[in-house]
């Protein structure tokens, strides 16, 4: 095992110990075996992207804080994860008459978890769910909380002051009037 690899694994081990978790506790939180946790900590197993995201959530870190940027394999996983995070949540944008409508499927969130900012050319979406602190009642936990922060460029200039956001059954709908280009004939003096 090389030095770079061991520094990653020690980080996972140290984070686990800082949270006063046993290997068994961490395995239960992640829905994997204790042997898998041991393999990760000893550098014999590189976690998948989804498992790396779960590890980051367990330790309340983002992937960059969890991962040692010196390790090439881990850096590749982090880069892929960060690029996926940038494009989440997935959105649809359509034009209906003189408005743009952006929709984002945010199942599991509610209106208190989501922030929307509209500018002339873009929409900024932020969301945060606080994880369930009582994990002892779970037999299996595949639905995890995920924070997001995404800026979506718009195809048309919109009027932010007249835009609205509605949240209904996990579907965020942002309605933005398109700026109408007005012309005025000027008299030349």
Image: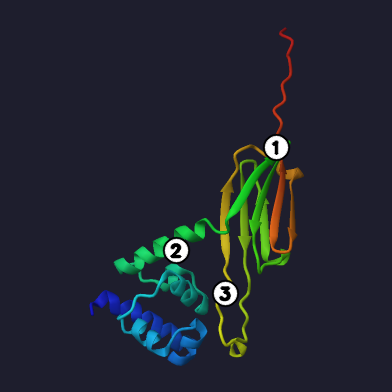
Answer above or below: position of 29 versus 171.
below
Residue 163, percent from left and from top: 74, 46
* Image mark for residue 178: 1
Residue 161, percent from left and from top: 74, 44
Residue at (71%, 31%) from the top-left corner?
A: 180
Residue at (25%, 77%) from the top-left corner?
A: 3
Find the distance from the CA under tag 3 to the CA under tag 2: 15 Å
How crowded pointer 1 is (Cα within 10 Å; few <14, some 14-19, many 20+) is rated as many
Comparing 154 with 93, the one in front is 93
Comparing 185 with 26, the one in front is 26
Res 23 quadrant in image: bottom left
Residue labelled with disc 3 = 144
Residue labelled with disc 2 = 81
* Image mark for residue 38: none
Q: In this image, 147 relative to 43: left or right? A: right
Comparing 8 with 29, the one in front is 29
């Amino acid at each position: 095992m090389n030095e770079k690899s061991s520094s990653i694994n020690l980080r996972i081990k140290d984070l686990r110990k800082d949270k006063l978790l046993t290997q068994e506790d961490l395995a239960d939180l992640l829905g994997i075996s204790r042997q898998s946790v041991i393999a990760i900590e000893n550098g014999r197993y590189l976690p998948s992207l989804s498992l790396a995201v779960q590890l980051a959530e367990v330790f309340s870190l983002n992937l960059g804080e969890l991962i040692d940027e010196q390790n090439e394999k881990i850096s590749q996983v982090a880069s892929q994860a960060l690029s996926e995070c940038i494009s989440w949540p997935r959105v649809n944008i359509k034009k209906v008459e003189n408005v743009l409508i952006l929709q984002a499927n945010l199942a599991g969130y509610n209106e208190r978890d989501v922030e929307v900012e509209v500018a002339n050319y873009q929409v900024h979406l932020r969301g945060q769910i606080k994880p369930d602190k009582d994990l002892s009642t779970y037999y299996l936990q595949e639905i995890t909380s995920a924070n997001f922060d995404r800026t979506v460029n718009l195809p048309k200039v919109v009027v932010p002051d007249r835009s609205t956001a509605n949240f209904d059954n996990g579907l965020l709908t942002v309605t933005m009037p398109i700026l109408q280009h007005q012309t005025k004939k000027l008299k030349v003096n």
